[in-house]
Image: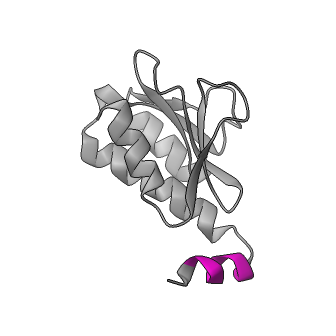
Amino acid sequence: MTPAELRAFCLDFNAAVEEFPFTPETSVFKVMGKMFALSALDAEPLKVNLKCDPEEALRQRAEHVAIAPGWHMNKRHWNTVTVAELPDALVRELVEDSYDLVVAGLPKAERLRLDRP
């Protein structure tokens, strides 16, 4: 997966936006103001921080060397994924899981706004 493909995939989710609150080089992808992915898209190797259920995070780290505790994040709830070392389908699944986890934590009124066309 290329940086452009990762960006496009993150922005394809309902109400997803890209912001740069930390540095101009660090893309932060949010839904309803809550972060679900963070990446320095120009970095080599390409990595992305993704939100994750704590138990699932531990399982993923044990199964894949390319998944580590979240760099500069709450390591219980975030993983850092080295994109090139995993199949694109798995990276997409991890990004989608992160988005879904963040949406599930939103107040009901905000979740309902996401469901509107």
Q: Residue at the location (41% across, 15% down)? A: 44
Q: Quadrant of the N terminus?
A: top left
Residue 68: x percent and y percent? 51, 29
Instruction: Answer above or below: position of 36 versus 101.
Output: above
Q: Residue at the location (45% across, 50% down)? A: 10
Q: Nearer the viewer, residue 25 or 106?
A: 25
Instruction: Answer above or below: position of 56 versus 75.
Output: below
110 inside magenta stretch: yes
59 inside magenta stretch: no
Q: Residue at the location (47% across, 52% down)? A: 11
Q: Residue at the location (46% across, 61% down)? A: 13
Residue lying at the far top of the rendered structure:
44
Counting every numbered tag in the picture gives: 0
Q: Quadrant of residue 20?
A: top right
Instruction: Answer above or below: position of 20 versus 29.
Output: above
Q: Nearer the viewer, residue 78 or 112?
A: 112
Residue 109: x percent and y percent? 73, 82
Q: Is residue 88 left or right of residue 104?
A: left
Q: Main secondary structure of the magenta part?
A: helix
Q: Is residue 27 left or right of residue 6?
A: right
Colouring convention used in this rendered image of the protein: one colour
Residue 74: x percent and y percent? 71, 37
Residue 52: x percent and y percent? 56, 50
Q: Is residue 68 left or right of residue 46?
A: right
Point out the stretch of residues depicted in magenta: 108-114
Instruction: Answer above or below: position of 38 versus 55.
Output: above
